[in-house]
Image (cartoon, helix red, strand yellow):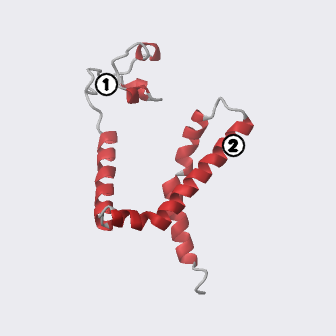
Amino acid sequence: MSAVFDAQLLAEVFVTLFVIMDPPGTVPVFLGLTGTMTAKGRNRAARQAILVAFGVIVTFALFGQQVLDYMNISLPALQASGGLLLLLVAMELLTVPLSDGWGVSARPVSSSMATRSSSRPPEACSAGSEMFM
């Protein structure tokens, strides 16, 4: 192989970025957020999202190690904390609480009832959450 083009590295980077960006998972979110926009507005929002994501990835690819060094965080410590965070999120998704801490039981209610309560935290008002209130 030539020193300039490494097909295996290109494949690894593509798969990694594909998993990070998660196009199949972001399509429903994007359509939900831009459903009321015109086609032109939706295209502009898509371009803007792509550019921002590209900028964040490139910035952290170029300067991420310097940021970690400045904060005295080792790469193994970052990997371990990321793994623990992923474990906590997975455990939260797998377990259904009997109560969400605000006195609301985990039983389905109609959406009209869900909008009447003002004692819920803001994250409880997100799309799809009314089935567990």
Q: Residue furthest front?
A: 70
Give the x, y percent position of residue 19.
49, 57
Of tags 1 and 2, the one toward the viewer is 2
Q: Residue furthest right?
A: 40
Give the x, y percent position of residue 55.
56, 57
> Where is 44 relative to 68, above or below?
above
Q: Quadrant of residue 46?
A: top right
Q: Amino acid at mark 2?
A: Arg
Q: Quadrant of residue 99?
A: top left
| Residue located at (68% from left, 32% from top) | 37
Relative placement, left or right, of 71 versus 12 is left
The first of marks 1 and 2 along the sequence is 2
Relative placement, left or right, of 35 versus 70 is right
Secondary element under disc 1, as helix, strand or loop, is: loop
| Residue located at (60% from left, 82% from top) | 4
- Label 1, on which residue? 106
| Residue located at (63% from left, 32% from top) | 35
Q: Nearer the viewer, residue 65 or 132?
A: 65
- Label 2, on which residue? 44
Give the x, y percent position of residue 24.
56, 48
Q: Amino acid at mark 1?
A: Ala
